[in-house]
Amino acid sequence: MSPDETTAAPAPRAGAREWLGLAVLALPTVLLALDFTVLHLALPHLAADLAPTSAQQLWILDIYGFMIAGFLITMGTLGDRIGRRRLLMAGAVAFGAASLLAAYATSAETLIAARALLGVAGATLMPSTLSLITNMFHDPEQRGVAVAVWLSCFSAGGAIGPMVGGVLLQWFWWGSVFLMGVPVMAVLLIAAPILLPEFRDPAPGRLDLVSVVLSLAAVLPVVYAIKEAAAYGWDPVVVALFVVGGVFGRLFVRRQRRLESPLMDLALFRLPPFTVGLGGLLLGTVVLGAFVLLFAQYLQLVLDLSPAAAGLWMVPYAVANIAGAMLAPMVAARLRAANTIALGLLVAAAGLVVFTLSGVEAGPVPAVVGGMLVTFGLSPLMVLVIDLVIASAPREKSGSASSMSETCSEIGMALGIATLGALGAAVYRFLMAGSVPSGVPAGEADAVRDSLPGAVAAAEDLEPSLAAEVLDAARRAFMAGLSVVGYTGVAIVLAVAVITFLFLRDVPEETEEEQREEQPKEG
């Protein structure tokens, strides 16, 4: 043992105030994740009330995630400069106001705008919560537990979103799913000054507004192009958007390399574990985002469960999320992080196969079991990569570092809906193009061909025997699309498992302090 190791003082351990502060940080974490999935069961009710087009339905679902992903890097850096608690409280005010706007939206366009504002506000909250955890919990063991709790809240929020939405939809109108944000943010505003300390970079650089614009100009056109290509095919406009996003992305990277205080610290990407971990996190959340959407639609639209019943059937999924996140650090301590992640991904692949083989006649049990395996298996990837990102960055840059992992997670969830979700929709439309019964009126026939929610809504206006024929064809087409998405997800998670095992298995198990000593010193 070296002299440095024998004389190094142990990291201070957190006390009761820090753990109570973690409970406060759990509130916005649960709510932010819940807002990703709470609309999945509400979509048929939205379609009946606001009559959005299929394109508008996709925007209502995924613009929230796109805006969070676009602004996360900016807000993470801003929190390092002005203070993470201050940014957290400002975001809470904005999130509460946008929640009210969304709840009482009277048109699809207004709801899309409100969801976009919720995304911007959410981007101020997410890096603040994780970076505050970094600075509140200095002991690596306690920090690992705190990160697991944080991720459990985020995972559980996404999982229980449909359940909460189902209960609310059973008794109230669809706008009630947004009103939950108002009391939660009020509690946060009261408790944060009492329990959460303030942290900021002691020597912050200037926030480069040009970099902010370049980051948005790089991310948003590419995401939009992917969504359009998946939904409607390739055309010159889609290609042009990819090119525009790529050009601005290149300009963004070049500018970061020249700045003394960059918006994104590209030096972190020189570490192979950091890069491989974030890439795996992105792909894992792509699969998870598509799965959550299809799971909710399967329960409600294929099995014809009520919103409340569908939500209750998703409770085991939420429990598996929490269990996987909390067990991951303990298993990694025995098997190493790379082995734990790869093993978990094999479990997730098995879960996707089980879910894909579910059918109308099988009932909800096989799908629920498959869902539990999927979320349990993906949890080690989420927890251990986030902990790696935290350990790789200096404390004063923790907001920027945490925003990188969260950017991968948020854009991955949105891309999962936009790409794999659109892939399933494309299979559905292909199969339904010539499968609509001849007795269906033209207006209803277009809705039937477009999506399963549209078919369910159109069937309500048809006579019973014709409605049953329409629904049978639509559900079979949906299940075919679900199978294509499911097996695509299996291929993705198996590829990530192999890459993780090959590239992360030789990473030394360093302490937080040793990793930070290897980082370039600033100044």
Image: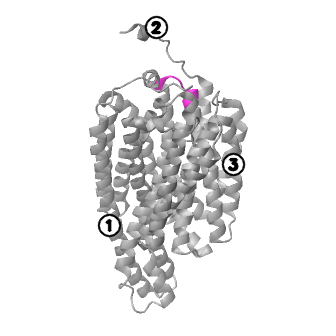
The residue lying toward the viewer, choosing from 93 and 123, is 123
Q: Assess whether residue 137 is covered by the magenta stretch.
A: yes
What residue is shown at x 56% (from left), y 56% (from top)? Answer: 217
Q: Which residue is mark 1?
A: 359
- In the image, what residue type sits under mark 1? Gly
136 falls in the magenta region: yes
Could you classify mark 3 by the number of other residues whose Cα lies within 10 Å: few (under 14), some (14-19), or many (20 or more)?
few
Query: Which residue occupies 47% across, 64% down?
Result: 225
Q: Is residue 283 visible from the viewing direction of this image? A: yes
Q: Mark 1: which secondary structure?
A: loop
Which amino acid lies under the numbered mark 2 shown in the image of this protein? Thr
Marks 1 and 2 in Cβ contact (< 8 Å): no
Q: Which residue is mark 3?
A: 183
Q: Is residue 294 left or right of residue 137?
A: left
Q: Nearer the viewer, residue 404 or 476?
A: 404
Q: Which span of residues is magenta-colored?
A: 134-141
User: Height in image: 326 above or below 73?
Assistant: above
